Amino acid sequence: MSKRNSTALVPAGASSAAMALPAVGNLDAYIAAVNRLPMLSPERETELGRRIRDNTDLEAAREMVMSHLRLVVSISRQYLGYGLPHADLIQEGNIGLMKAVKRFDPERGVRLVSFAMHWIKAEIHEYILKNWRMVKVATTKAQRKLFFNLRSHRTDAHTLSAGDVEHIAAKLNVKASEVMEMETRLTGQDMALEPMSDDSDDDYGPISYLAAHNAEPTQVLERRHTDRLQGEGIAQALASLDARSRRIIESRWLRDESEGGTLTLHDLADEFGVSAERIRQIEVKAMQKMKAALAEYA
């Protein structure tokens, strides 16, 4: 595996010698080795999950990761059509697996294999979008979803006809204009910013006339950070609240004029049958919890 030594995941004190991954020299040998690693029983998985959750047990985490490496290999094969190295796809998927193990809660009644699939695919998606092209073809969450769906629904390399666009739009439940925009991004060619040679005064590239006065790196990162907090961050923070607290925050801060505008403390007090002061207290506590969730997300 590139960039990382796969033997670093071997649990030094694993309960079974079979959990040790031998040193491997190529990808085929690595895949063969991880496929020989034993899978965990539900009871053992629950035990390890509790050790990780309660004691941050690194040996338990190592055993959980090792037993699910074959899952990463299986998922990574679905993305070989993007022309990126299989070893790198597996590597990124392994990062997602480690994140899943860290966040896994055995008390929810869900096996790690189901929980980890989301994290593995998310890391692989991020890697593909960063490396498939020099210029990103998808920036928002909706565009990323459309990017992968459109790639899987295209049957050949030819430009989509109007009928194809309508068919795919209906199948993916998106607007035809969105399909056309993503199709343009997918089929567009990268262009060199600088001239190909210095032999002629007539040769010039986009770098000669393109200027982005608001593209200073720190400003770009700050805007991107703000956009994430206002979108995914707030959604995640709201999800951390109970139903009543979420209703109060949404009614007090997130309602627009089309919904009748924001509600007062007295409006909500009447709705929940408590005093306006109690609604204010719940609002303050909910805002504190959301701030903590946003800080963790950031």
Image (tube, grey):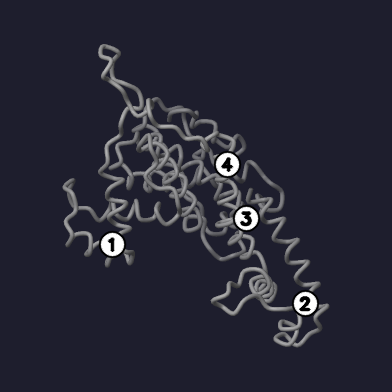
Amino acid residing under circle 1 = Ala
**Outermost residue to the right:** 277
Question: What residue does disc 2 label?
Answer: 279
Q: Callout 4: helix, strand or loop?
A: helix
Give the tally of numbered discs: 4
Q: Residue at x 45, y 44 (%)?
A: 126
* Residues at marks 3 and 2, CA–CA distance in whole angstroms: 42 Å
Q: x%, y% of residue 90?
A: 41, 39
Q: Callout 1: helix, strand or loop?
A: helix
Circle 3 or circle 2, nearest the eye: 2
Q: As drawn, is 63 to the left or to the right of 57?
A: left
Q: As drawn, is 215 to the left or to the right of 252?
A: left
Circle 2 or circle 4, nearest the eye: 2
Q: x%, y% of residue 157?
A: 18, 45
Question: What residue does disc 1 label?
Answer: 176
Circle 1 or circle 2, nearest the eye: 1
Question: What residue does disc 4 label?
Answer: 62
* Residues at marks 2 and 4, CA–CA distance in whole angstroms: 46 Å
Query: Is disc 3 surrounded by few (<14), some (14 to 19) or many (20+) residues within 10 Å?
Result: few
Residue 233, quarter of picture: bottom right
Residue 211, quarter of picture: top left
Q: Of callouts 3 and 2, which one flags the residue occurring earlier in the amino acid sequence? A: 3
Q: x%, y% of residue 247?
A: 65, 75
